[in-house]
Image (tube, rainbow, N blue to C red):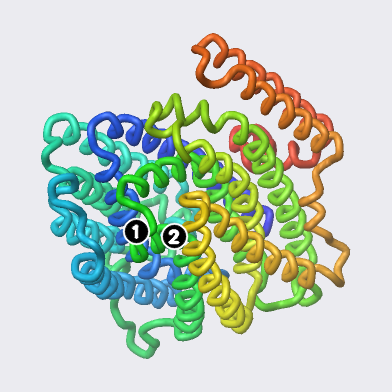
Amino acid sequence: MSSQDILKDASTLASYNVLLQVMFRVLTFLLNAFTLRFVSKELIGVVNVRLTLLYSTLVFLSREAFRRACLSGESGTTRSWRQVINLLWLTVPLGVLWGTLLACVWLWLLEVPDAQSVPYYSPAVVLFAFAGVQELLAEPLWVLAQAHMFVRLKVVAESLAMIAKCSITVVLVVFAPGWGLYIFSAAHLVYTGFLVLCYTVYFIRFLGSKGASRKSFPLHSVGDLLPRRVDGEPLVDWTLARLTWSFFKQSFLKQILTEGERYVMTFLNVLSFGDQGVYDIVNNLGSMVARFVFLPIEESFYIFFAKVLERGHGVKSQRQEDVAIAAEVLECLLKLVLVIGLIITVFGYAYSQLALDIYGGSLLSSGAGPSLLRCYSCYVLLLAVNGVTECFVFAAMSQEEVDKYNLVMLALSVSFLVLSYMLTWWAGGVGFILANCLNMGLRIFHSLMYIQRYFQFSEWKPLRGLLPSPFLLLALCISAVVTAASEAAFCCDSGWLLRMVHIGVGALCLLGVLVAILLTETRLIEFVRTQLLPRYRKKRT
């Protein structure tokens, strides 16, 4: 497959992933707004912080390293995929091991919530751990689908699972509110069960079909999806296994950085369960764009860079056509996420209080809520840049470089935990965001240095994507001043008429920024039009 074809497939995957994440975030957004009216903030804090942390830790440590290793490079032959499938099935026993260890910690070492305000905590811990192990049953199928760009399968499977989860939650919250944590445990089990069911049914129907033959799919029967040994061949590809081990050491540290504030809240008790609930709601609201735009782009273009570039090789030792495409894509991606991040930072500051007041009323818009969301708007800009730079770096690094980077991640993890603890005592929930900003800045700096060294002796300079046009910067500065003045004058205690005036001022400023982008960032517009919007590419083909 040529690099242009890989780029098209990765772009299609990114587009569908963005649409999928938009739907997820909107449904979760509406679900949280709904449940706020029926359950206590303490219950939300336990579910969204402690139990979700248990689940995310289990699945991340069990599968992330396998995903990154098995999606690196080409595995085009039946023999290689046989060994890849065997390796991927190790995620299930690894998940059982992690689930058992984590459940013991959550049940016996952590503070148990009050049974009156948060009932059925112990069974919920076991059920969330079981849901994580259940999801790992679909991991070999997920990797196969990603590697062969079955983008619609992921959209359909995760959409159905999310709709089922939301439906169960709404019904139980309304008709059985006394079930407490059983409500969210049942909904999560339904979600992971739907994922496994959808992937299993699809591959049972697909394998051996005419469509599989046309695609030259490397597996031919359902039995090929199960682990088995082939005579005369190693059970797994040991080179891939060693790369998985390197990524595993890194994933452990990355999980601490990604979920660091939840670990601090869970293990150090710096915030009450109610405050954790408010922080998590604000955090989810602030990270909506980061999750449904930046994360799908990072996941999809990691696959593109991993397939186009040769891991551990310099620019001069690779096909120059592939390197040129990778450099151009990296520059455009950097410009794209930078522009989106700047817009969120500028407008997020002036509209945080209004957004929280509409979403959760005085429960969120009073106190520290608006300050949290304003700080998070700035953090989103760093998240945007870091996601793209790290997806390139992780795809280009050799195994030895990945091992060295693990030491950097270790230092960042320790510094983050220390900073989180210190800044939280000083600034409350805002301290978590400040600590994240500092650590994210260090990660970006490391990635930029790697990219600079990677391309320093070549004609390509992809880091120019971090330099927006002066006209666009001027438009953003004017918008920041105007919207801040509008908030002081019209928002948010003077009725809906003045709120609408404030919204109208923001809409006009945003329109001006978009016009500036259209006039000055023509190369970025062309990249989005041709690579990230499937309908335009369909017209071209």
Q: In this figure, which residue is indicated by the disc labeled 2?
A: 259
Q: In this figure, which residue is indicated by the disc labeled 1?
A: 53
Q: Residue at x 39, y 87 (%)?
A: 233
Left or right of residue 22: residue 476: right
Front residue of 1/476: it is 476
Q: Position of residue 141 (x, y in %)?
A: 36, 60
Q: Position of residue 341 (x, y in %)?
A: 65, 43
Numbered mark located on residue 82 in the image: none
* Crowding near the residue tagged with mark 1, few <14, some 14–19, many ≥20 C-alpha atoms within 10 Å: some
Left or right of residue 440: residue 189: left
Q: Residue furthest top?
A: 497
The amino acid type found where label 1 is placed reads Leu
Q: Position of residue 209 (x, y in %)?
A: 35, 53
Q: Quadrant of residue 348?
A: top right
Q: Verify CB contact (< 8 Å) between mark 1 and mark 2.
A: yes
Question: Which image quarter holds the C terminus?
Answer: top right
In this rendering, is residue 159 above or below 431? above
Q: Residue at x 64, y 52 (%)?
A: 382
Which type of secondary structure does the marked residue at label 1 adopt? helix
